[in-house]
Image (cartoon, helix red, strand yellow):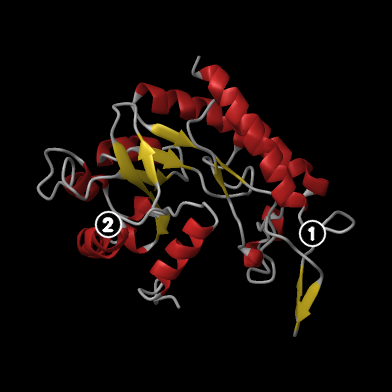
Amino acid sequence: MADENGEPGEDLVPVILDNAHKYNLKYISRSNILSQLACCYEYLPYCLLYRYGGHPAFYRHKTSTGRTLPMFYIYDSYVTIPEIWANLLTVSGSQSIRNTPYDGLFIALLVEEKHKHEIHRSGFDGIYTYFATNGFSYGSSHHNWPSLKAFCDSSNLMFVPSVGPGYIDTSIRPWNNHNTRNRVNGKYYETAFSAALLVRPEIISITSFNEWHEGTQIEKAVPKKTGQVTYLDYKPHKPTMYLELTHKWSEKYSKEKEQWLM
Protein backbone atom coordinates (compact mmCIF):
# COMPACT_ATOMS: atom_id res chain seq x y z
CA MET A 1 0.00 0.00 0.00
CA ALA A 2 2.99 2.32 0.55
CA ASP A 3 6.52 2.48 -0.80
CA GLU A 4 9.80 2.41 1.11
CA ASN A 5 9.57 6.16 1.76
CA GLY A 6 6.17 5.90 3.38
CA GLU A 7 4.43 7.40 0.33
CA PRO A 8 1.09 5.96 -0.83
CA GLY A 9 1.57 3.31 -3.50
CA GLU A 10 0.42 4.25 -7.00
CA ASP A 11 -2.60 1.95 -6.75
CA LEU A 12 -3.68 3.59 -3.49
CA VAL A 13 -3.66 7.25 -4.57
CA PRO A 14 -6.78 7.11 -6.76
CA VAL A 15 -8.59 5.18 -4.02
CA ILE A 16 -7.74 7.93 -1.51
CA LEU A 17 -8.85 10.63 -3.94
CA ASP A 18 -12.11 8.89 -4.84
CA ASN A 19 -13.04 8.35 -1.20
CA ALA A 20 -12.04 11.90 -0.29
CA HIS A 21 -14.34 13.20 -3.02
CA LYS A 22 -17.14 10.95 -1.76
CA TYR A 23 -17.00 12.67 1.64
CA ASN A 24 -16.29 16.17 0.29
CA LEU A 25 -12.68 16.16 1.47
CA LYS A 26 -9.58 17.47 -0.30
CA TYR A 27 -6.21 15.77 -0.64
CA ILE A 28 -2.95 17.62 0.06
CA SER A 29 0.37 15.85 -0.32
CA ARG A 30 2.79 15.80 2.61
CA SER A 31 5.84 14.07 1.31
CA ASN A 32 9.20 12.81 2.53
CA ILE A 33 10.28 11.93 -0.98
CA LEU A 34 9.97 15.53 -2.17
CA SER A 35 12.75 16.50 0.22
CA GLN A 36 15.11 14.40 -1.89
CA LEU A 37 15.62 16.64 -4.90
CA ALA A 38 16.82 13.82 -7.13
CA CYS A 39 13.29 12.38 -6.94
CA CYS A 40 11.39 15.65 -6.66
CA TYR A 41 11.49 16.93 -10.21
CA GLU A 42 10.45 13.56 -11.66
CA TYR A 43 8.01 12.38 -8.97
CA LEU A 44 6.12 15.60 -8.36
CA PRO A 45 4.79 16.47 -11.83
CA TYR A 46 4.34 12.95 -13.12
CA CYS A 47 2.92 11.03 -10.18
CA LEU A 48 0.96 13.83 -8.56
CA LEU A 49 0.05 16.65 -10.90
CA TYR A 50 0.13 14.90 -14.26
CA ARG A 51 -1.71 11.82 -13.05
CA TYR A 52 -4.00 13.15 -10.36
CA GLY A 53 -4.01 16.95 -10.56
CA GLY A 54 -7.34 17.05 -12.37
CA HIS A 55 -9.17 15.00 -9.74
CA PRO A 56 -11.93 17.00 -7.96
CA ALA A 57 -10.55 15.93 -4.57
CA PHE A 58 -7.06 17.26 -5.32
CA TYR A 59 -6.80 20.39 -3.18
CA ARG A 60 -6.04 23.70 -4.83
CA HIS A 61 -5.58 26.93 -2.91
CA LYS A 62 -6.56 30.36 -4.19
CA THR A 63 -3.68 32.78 -3.76
CA SER A 64 -3.79 36.53 -3.15
CA THR A 65 -3.00 37.03 -6.84
CA GLY A 66 -6.08 35.08 -7.87
CA ARG A 67 -4.21 31.97 -9.03
CA THR A 68 -5.46 28.56 -7.85
CA LEU A 69 -2.57 26.21 -7.18
CA PRO A 70 -2.06 22.75 -5.66
CA MET A 71 -0.42 22.76 -2.24
CA PHE A 72 2.41 20.51 -1.04
CA TYR A 73 3.75 20.15 2.50
CA ILE A 74 7.39 19.07 2.35
CA TYR A 75 8.72 17.22 5.38
CA ASP A 76 12.43 17.53 6.28
CA SER A 77 12.82 20.22 3.62
CA TYR A 78 15.84 21.60 5.51
CA VAL A 79 17.85 18.48 4.61
CA THR A 80 18.36 19.93 1.12
CA ILE A 81 20.33 23.19 0.96
CA PRO A 82 18.54 26.40 -0.15
CA GLU A 83 20.64 26.78 -3.32
CA ILE A 84 19.35 23.47 -4.67
CA TRP A 85 15.74 24.20 -3.76
CA ALA A 86 16.07 27.59 -5.43
CA ASN A 87 16.89 25.90 -8.74
CA LEU A 88 13.40 24.47 -8.65
CA LEU A 89 11.34 27.02 -6.74
CA THR A 90 12.54 30.43 -7.93
CA VAL A 91 11.67 32.01 -11.27
CA SER A 92 15.34 32.30 -12.24
CA GLY A 93 16.22 28.74 -11.17
CA SER A 94 17.85 26.45 -13.73
CA GLN A 95 15.03 23.88 -13.36
CA SER A 96 12.30 26.29 -12.32
CA ILE A 97 8.72 25.02 -12.24
CA ARG A 98 7.35 28.50 -11.56
CA ASN A 99 4.69 29.62 -14.04
CA THR A 100 4.63 26.13 -15.58
CA PRO A 101 1.85 23.53 -15.42
CA TYR A 102 3.72 22.01 -12.46
CA ASP A 103 3.77 25.14 -10.32
CA GLY A 104 2.24 25.01 -6.86
CA LEU A 105 2.38 26.27 -3.30
CA PHE A 106 5.28 24.56 -1.54
CA ILE A 107 5.21 24.69 2.26
CA ALA A 108 8.47 23.87 4.06
CA LEU A 109 8.94 22.46 7.55
CA LEU A 110 10.46 24.87 10.07
CA VAL A 111 12.13 23.26 13.08
CA GLU A 112 14.89 25.69 14.09
CA GLU A 113 14.67 29.49 13.95
CA LYS A 114 17.41 29.70 11.32
CA HIS A 115 15.24 27.69 8.95
CA LYS A 116 13.01 30.69 8.29
CA HIS A 117 15.82 32.47 6.42
CA GLU A 118 16.77 29.29 4.54
CA ILE A 119 13.13 28.73 3.56
CA HIS A 120 12.90 32.26 2.23
CA ARG A 121 16.10 31.89 0.18
CA SER A 122 14.90 28.53 -1.16
CA GLY A 123 11.87 30.03 -2.85
CA PHE A 124 9.24 28.24 -0.80
CA ASP A 125 5.78 29.76 -0.49
CA GLY A 126 5.36 29.22 3.22
CA ILE A 127 6.28 27.36 6.38
CA TYR A 128 4.50 24.92 8.64
CA THR A 129 5.48 23.77 12.14
CA TYR A 130 4.13 20.18 12.10
CA PHE A 131 5.04 18.87 15.57
CA ALA A 132 2.25 18.53 18.13
CA THR A 133 4.61 19.02 21.06
CA ASN A 134 4.58 22.59 22.35
CA GLY A 135 8.18 23.36 23.31
CA PHE A 136 9.79 20.50 21.37
CA SER A 137 11.17 22.73 18.62
CA TYR A 138 11.37 26.45 17.92
CA GLY A 139 8.64 26.11 15.32
CA SER A 140 6.29 24.04 17.45
CA SER A 141 6.52 26.39 20.47
CA HIS A 142 3.36 28.45 20.62
CA HIS A 143 5.09 31.53 22.04
CA ASN A 144 7.21 31.79 18.88
CA TRP A 145 4.26 31.89 16.50
CA PRO A 146 3.70 35.68 16.62
CA SER A 147 7.30 36.40 15.57
CA LEU A 148 7.19 33.70 12.90
CA LYS A 149 3.96 35.14 11.52
CA ALA A 150 5.52 38.61 11.45
CA PHE A 151 8.55 37.26 9.57
CA CYS A 152 6.32 35.50 7.06
CA ASP A 153 4.21 38.61 6.53
CA SER A 154 7.32 40.68 5.82
CA SER A 155 8.76 37.99 3.52
CA ASN A 156 5.62 37.24 1.51
CA LEU A 157 5.36 33.74 2.97
CA MET A 158 2.37 31.84 4.32
CA PHE A 159 2.55 30.85 7.98
CA VAL A 160 0.79 27.57 8.76
CA PRO A 161 0.87 26.72 12.49
CA SER A 162 0.21 23.07 13.32
CA VAL A 163 -2.02 22.18 16.26
CA GLY A 164 -2.33 18.81 17.96
CA PRO A 165 -4.34 17.13 20.74
CA GLY A 166 -1.31 15.91 22.71
CA TYR A 167 1.76 13.75 22.20
CA ILE A 168 3.09 10.41 23.46
CA ASP A 169 5.45 8.24 21.43
CA THR A 170 7.08 6.14 24.15
CA SER A 171 5.75 2.90 22.61
CA ILE A 172 8.21 3.43 19.73
CA ARG A 173 10.70 5.82 21.43
CA PRO A 174 10.93 4.72 25.10
CA TRP A 175 13.61 7.37 25.78
CA ASN A 176 11.38 10.28 24.71
CA ASN A 177 9.11 10.55 27.73
CA HIS A 178 10.16 14.19 28.34
CA ASN A 179 8.32 15.19 25.15
CA THR A 180 5.03 13.64 26.20
CA ARG A 181 2.20 16.17 26.36
CA ASN A 182 -0.95 15.20 28.24
CA ARG A 183 -4.25 15.86 26.47
CA VAL A 184 -5.77 17.30 29.66
CA ASN A 185 -9.28 16.26 28.59
CA GLY A 186 -9.05 18.30 25.39
CA LYS A 187 -7.60 21.45 26.93
CA TYR A 188 -4.19 20.96 25.30
CA TYR A 189 -5.84 20.85 21.86
CA GLU A 190 -7.95 23.91 22.55
CA THR A 191 -4.94 25.85 23.86
CA ALA A 192 -3.09 25.10 20.62
CA PHE A 193 -6.04 26.27 18.51
CA SER A 194 -6.34 29.42 20.59
CA ALA A 195 -2.64 30.20 20.10
CA ALA A 196 -2.97 29.64 16.35
CA LEU A 197 -5.98 31.92 16.01
CA LEU A 198 -4.13 34.72 17.79
CA VAL A 199 -1.72 35.08 14.85
CA ARG A 200 -4.49 35.10 12.23
CA PRO A 201 -3.02 32.49 9.88
CA GLU A 202 -4.40 31.84 6.42
CA ILE A 203 -4.35 28.09 7.13
CA ILE A 204 -4.10 25.93 10.27
CA SER A 205 -2.91 22.33 9.96
CA ILE A 206 -3.71 19.52 12.38
CA THR A 207 -1.19 16.93 13.57
CA SER A 208 -2.73 14.47 13.19
CA PHE A 209 -5.80 12.52 12.14
CA ASN A 210 -4.52 9.00 12.81
CA GLU A 211 -0.86 8.85 13.87
CA TRP A 212 -1.54 6.54 16.78
CA HIS A 213 2.13 5.63 17.25
CA GLU A 214 2.80 9.23 18.33
CA GLY A 215 -0.45 9.70 20.21
CA THR A 216 -1.63 12.63 18.09
CA GLN A 217 -4.76 11.06 16.60
CA ILE A 218 -8.09 12.87 16.64
CA GLU A 219 -10.14 10.19 14.87
CA LYS A 220 -12.87 8.24 16.63
CA ALA A 221 -11.35 6.06 19.34
CA VAL A 222 -12.66 3.13 21.37
CA PRO A 223 -10.74 0.87 23.80
CA LYS A 224 -8.56 -1.54 21.83
CA LYS A 225 -5.68 -3.89 22.62
CA THR A 226 -3.68 -5.84 20.06
CA GLY A 227 -0.96 -8.11 21.40
CA GLN A 228 1.19 -5.96 23.68
CA VAL A 229 -0.19 -2.67 22.35
CA THR A 230 -3.02 -0.87 24.13
CA TYR A 231 -4.48 1.94 22.07
CA LEU A 232 -5.39 5.13 23.86
CA ASP A 233 -9.04 6.11 23.98
CA TYR A 234 -10.80 9.24 25.17
CA LYS A 235 -12.70 7.86 28.14
CA PRO A 236 -14.63 9.10 30.06
CA HIS A 237 -15.48 11.24 27.00
CA LYS A 238 -17.19 10.13 23.80
CA PRO A 239 -15.20 8.34 21.07
CA THR A 240 -15.84 11.34 18.80
CA MET A 241 -14.61 13.90 21.33
CA TYR A 242 -11.71 15.26 19.25
CA LEU A 243 -13.67 15.33 16.03
CA GLU A 244 -16.26 17.45 17.83
CA LEU A 245 -13.57 19.76 19.21
CA THR A 246 -12.14 20.07 15.70
CA HIS A 247 -15.56 21.01 14.35
CA LYS A 248 -16.03 23.57 17.13
CA TRP A 249 -12.69 25.28 16.50
CA SER A 250 -13.01 25.06 12.72
CA GLU A 251 -16.25 26.99 12.91
CA LYS A 252 -14.69 29.53 15.28
CA TYR A 253 -11.73 29.92 12.92
CA SER A 254 -14.00 30.41 9.90
CA LYS A 255 -16.02 33.10 11.67
CA GLU A 256 -12.95 34.96 12.89
CA LYS A 257 -11.30 34.71 9.49
CA GLU A 258 -14.31 36.41 7.91
CA GLN A 259 -13.86 39.29 10.35
CA TRP A 260 -10.11 39.54 9.60
CA LEU A 261 -10.84 39.90 5.90
CA MET A 262 -13.49 42.62 6.33
- Taking depth in this image into account, of 191 and 259 the one nearest to the observer is 259
User: Where residue 229 sits in the image (x, y, percent)?
Assistant: 74, 77
Rendered position, 37 above or below 249: below
Q: Residue 58's x, y, as percent?
A: 38, 53
Residue at 73% x, 46% y: name it: 244
Tell me if mark 2 has few (under 14), some (14-19) or many (20+) residues whose alpha carbon lies within 10 angstroms of its own.
Answer: some
User: Does residue 184 appear left or right of residue 210 in this picture?
Assistant: right
* Residue 126 x, y percent position in the rendering: 38, 38
Instruction: Check disc 2 and report its element: helix, strand or loop.
Output: helix
Give amino acid for label 2.
Answer: Leu
| Residue at the disc numbered 2 | 49
Taking the view exactly as shown, the residue that stands out farthest to the bottom is 227
Amino acid on which disc 1 is placed: Pro
Within the image, what quadrant is residue 169 found in? bottom right
Question: What kind of element bears circle 1?
Answer: loop
- Does residue 83 sit above or below 152 in this rendering? below
How crowded is the residue under tag 1: few (<14 C-alpha within 10 Å), some, or many (20+)? some
Q: Who's the residue at 90% across and 56% down the image? A: 236
Give me the residue at 56% from left, 18% from top: 259
- Residue extending farthest to the front is 22
Q: Does residue 110 appear in the picture of this structure?
A: yes
Mark 2 or mark 1, earlier in chain: 2
Q: Which residue is nearer to you in this view: 123 or 251?
A: 251
Q: Please state the horizontal and vertical placement of residue 194, each as a whole percent of the image.
A: 67, 31
**Quadrant location, the N terminus:** bottom left
Q: Which mark is residue 239?
A: 1
Q: Is residue 6 visible?
A: no
